[in-house]
Amino acid sequence: MAAGIGIGRFVYTPILPPMVEALSLSKAEAGLIASANFVGYLAGALLAAVRLPGSRRAWLLAGLALNAVCLAAMGVATSLVLFLLLRLAAGIASAFCLIFSSALVLDRLATTGRSGLSALHFSGVGIGIAVSAALVATLSDWRAMWLASAALALVAAVAVVMTVPAEAAPSTAAERAPRTKLSSAFVMLAVAYFLFGIGYIITATFLIDIVRGSPAIRHLEPYAWVLVGIGAAPSVVLWGALGRRIGILPAFAVASLVEAAGVVASVLWLQTIGVVIAALFLGGTFMGLTALGLIGAREAGEGDPRGRIALMTASFSLGQIIGPVFAGIVYDATGSFTVPSLAAAAGLVLAALFSLMAQRQRHRRA
């Protein structure tokens, strides 16, 4: 998770500002590169949802290898087309890393009766973000940042090779499971997940660019993304605990509102405390929301949940694809990320409302 998601997907954010300056990229082009990664993630998630030949471990290792290669190639690429293709491939790799590592780890934890440790697995995303951000902050050249990130991801991949054993033959029970059935509660939750995808990704893509472009807080550039990672590491544990206390969907609503506050702070409170709140609120919610949404999808219907999880992934990915392109276009037209960020915050508020509507529908069915 640290290599494929924390580094593979999110290291683009702290590298983006010096890369944009060096190559004179427009914000629309920067957003397009980000969206290419999310298109790849969508494709990878849908591909991983079907029955692929070979073991899950083999596909995980393939994803980790492709991830490291794509990161290194970003440091030597010279054209927008190559950047788009590489981030597209990296998105596929990230999806494979997430899905196959989660399948392996969660199955092993369930077998050993230690499912409560699953939050530690998801905390790898925050660890990867924090470590890669700290590494990138020590470098000044954007090409060196990509190459160093690739080396870090490769070290993590080697660790996986050494620690993840070969698996037993998978059960065929899933193939005999009943066909996926959808409910109105699930549809509302999928809409909320789509809005969450748009709502978090604009800040997740452009936060460091916002900090770099604001003279009063530019000195915080090396630290802001580290704070995001620090906030992300324990977030699944905390939001999971709240979900068990008040319910998964109400917890999703609360997390959406907290994230909305962080998104607003990122553009309307351009001071040190505002940046700290924006980074911690973003990091402290996005992985928790991801986990809560998928747990909610499993519970929001009957039959095999894999179809619902695939649809949730598609909904989330579509929001991620739209967000950066929309923000980049609006920035090029207005010279500011304020409008797209406030639109994203409004989307998160709507996500909270839709999740509560889904909760009400579940209670009616019960």
Image: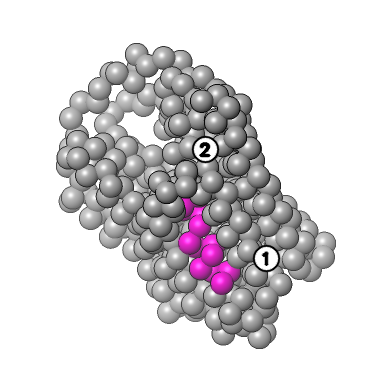
3D distance between C-alphas at marks 2 and 1: 25 Å
Please identify the quarter of the rendering in which residue 265 is found.
Answer: bottom right
Residue 128 tag number: none
Badge 1 amino acid: Val
Q: Is residue 113 above or below residue 272?
A: above
The answer to whether residue 279 is magenta is yes
* Magenta part of the chain: 277-289
How was the colour assigned to the protein in this rendering?
A: one colour
Q: Residue at x 65, y 45 (%)?
A: 353
Residue 339 position, x and y percent, is: 77, 61
Q: Is residue 150 visible?
A: no
Badge 1 density bin: few <14, some 14–19, many ≥20, Cα 10 Å: many
Residue 346: x percent and y percent?
71, 54
Q: Main secondary structure of the magenta part?
A: helix
Per the rendering, the mark at residue 264 is: 1
Q: Is residue 265 magenta?
A: no
Report the number of discs. 2
Q: Nearer the viewer, residue 196 or 327?
A: 196
Residue 100 horizontal/vertical position (percent):
34, 39
Residue at 54% across, 65% down: 281
Give the residue displayed 43% in from the left and 19% down from the top.
303
Q: Earlier in the sequence, mark 2 or mark 1?
A: 1
Tell which of 74 and 314 is nearer to you.
Answer: 314
From what the image shows, is residue 19 above or below residue 45?
below
- The three-letter amino acid code for the residue at tag 2 is Thr
Q: Which residue is mark 2?
A: 313
